[in-house]
Amino acid sequence: MRWAARGNGKTNGVNNDELPEPKPQISCPCKQNKLSGRCYWLILTPTSYLRCNPATKWIMVASFPLQVHEFCETLKGLEIVDDSIRMAKGVPKVTSLDEIYSNATDGALPEQKSRFRHLIDSFNKANGSKPDFVARSPGRVNIIGEHIDYSLYNVLPTAVLNDVLVAVKVKESSSESTMKVANTNDTKYPTAEFHVPQEGEVHMGEHDWSNYFKAGLRGSIHVLRKERGDNFQPKSMDVMIDGNVPAGGGLSSSAAFVCASALAVMAANGHEVSKQDLLDLCIVSERSVGVYSGGMDQAASIFSERGYLLYCRFFPEFSAEHVPVPAADPEITFLIAQSFVTSDKAVTAARHYNLRVVEVTLAAVTLAKFFDITLDPDSSSLGFSIRNFQEELMKKLGKGDLAEDKQLDIMINLIKEKLTQPSYSRANVARILEIEVSALEKAYFSKFDVEGDTFKLQQRALHVVEEARRVVAFKDTLSSNAGKKLNQDQLSYLGDLMNKTQDSCRDVYECSCPEIDDICAIARKNGAIGSRLTGAGWGGCTVHLVPQNKVEGVTQALKKEYYNKNFPDLSADKMEDAIVISKPGQGSSLITGEALNV
């Protein structure tokens, strides 16, 4: 694998195995060093380089004379042209829409320029001037790794073309901060005006569309007050939103909205937020609208880059790796098809999404109890994840050095052996954990709304671990063929992994629906190699791995056998949005300067 680091405008790189083993060692106290889980070569100049081994926390240096402090300051200025260190970099500022939308899909750039021009003109008309900047975050499609991020297992999403744009004019605040939040579609989304209280939280309305902006605002103010003091008063803002990520469509419109809003507030208050810090605050912010996600949606929206899938790791801390999709023979593409069955997580979360979070958490703590393991709290929604349990179990069994896929095979077998009941009541779980039902409810049912009295622990845990196994296999297939072409057997294998995900979502995790099942069956019958739901499920969106020469056939079959049959009165605009041919897209950015002069 080739690694390169960028410093002072110069890029140098060599292969790992071309470098001699460094001998001098120093301990690095730099808090910006977020490497985790593996060794990295950082190429500083043609003759100086270093390697970080996170397991030993040593930095090994060759031909590098700087003192520790100077070294750490240099490290902060580097950008790894591959993965984890990039997270410490700030959200990029772009001055041309070409940097975001070119090569996204055929004809995308002119269409997006027209849309952007409409946003700028609408803002100017409403506020008497152009915005100072536009914050942007895209929706995402998860290629594989469904409902496992909140158990802290790895996933493979990427950003899509569809995004949320937040145009902002910063205003000086007088006695209090005032927010005016408008939408280019003001008939459907009326303008909201409100004040930011000096103390306490911004008030959230009852299923008000502006709550998603308020969620980003809440999280940002919390960070800014922590940094600048409790008396910090945010700038007043005139805001206009334009979004084309379908609500409830499985492309994570809520994460795109919250991420763009948080980025806008941070930028308006002069804070150049890093991608990592934006991720952290957005995961928490989205909980203000009742969505307790594991972070994959926000990570894909913020970190994605054109032409790559994003391999997201959540344990022991977040890191990301950009995985190129190799060429293939035949050439392939990702086709995204909407079901038009809407699943609004803010409304249905208690009986769907949040219930699954509780079930997999109860599975983790129950398994830990069976093996007499005490789990330390982790970053998952309720503090204890199956991935956390796996880590501690492997240590106890002396199998911590096993490859990830082998560890997951062990997990699959023990889940079948230990979680034997078809379902568990609250009393069942409390008895296993040796606590009162009231204590169980306080620990796992009081943080957010949950509807349910029985819990399918084996089924939910099996889906999580088997899906994690499929993600590893999918990523390894792509990585092992970097620079090569995927052959037919490899394409069939990738498609089979996606198909098995759909089967598990339907039968084991029970987050599919008949409409999603129909779309997948139609697509496979007409040439898709792999088809599955993507997103929260219970409706929403599907993603399909399709040979380029089969795209037209799959598209026409879906129109005839699904859309025309189920939605005969579907408008032309809706039909146009129903199917998207996806290329991996660009993540969050601040649009400034000449880009505003459209």
Image (cartoon, helix red, strand yellow):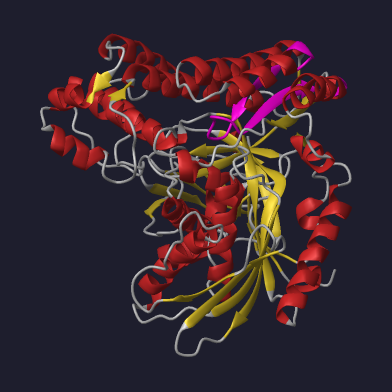
Residue, x 64% and y 32% (percent of image)? 541
Membership of 71 in magenta stretch: no
Q: Position of residue 410 (x, y in %)?
A: 36, 14
State the residue lying farthest toward the bottom.
174
**In front here: 210 or 138?**
210
Instruction: Name the quarter where the N terminus is drawn.
Output: top right
Residue 25: in sight, yes or no? yes
Answer with the quarter of the image where residue 367 lies: top left
571 with respect to 299 (left or right) = right
Q: Position of residue 452 (x, y in %)?
A: 32, 30
Task: Return the residue nearer the eye: 38 or 385.
Answer: 385
Q: Is residue 137 left or right of residue 469?
A: right
**Looking at the image, is 290 positioned above or below residue 225?**
above
**Relative depth, front residue between 40 and 238:** 238
> Which portion, as a residue range, is magenta?
525-549
Identify the image quadrant of residue 238: bottom right
Question: What residue do we see at 27% from left, 39% from top?
Answer: 445
Left or right: 373, with 39 as reference point: left
Vertical comparison of 98 with 150: above or below: below
531 falls in the magenta region: yes
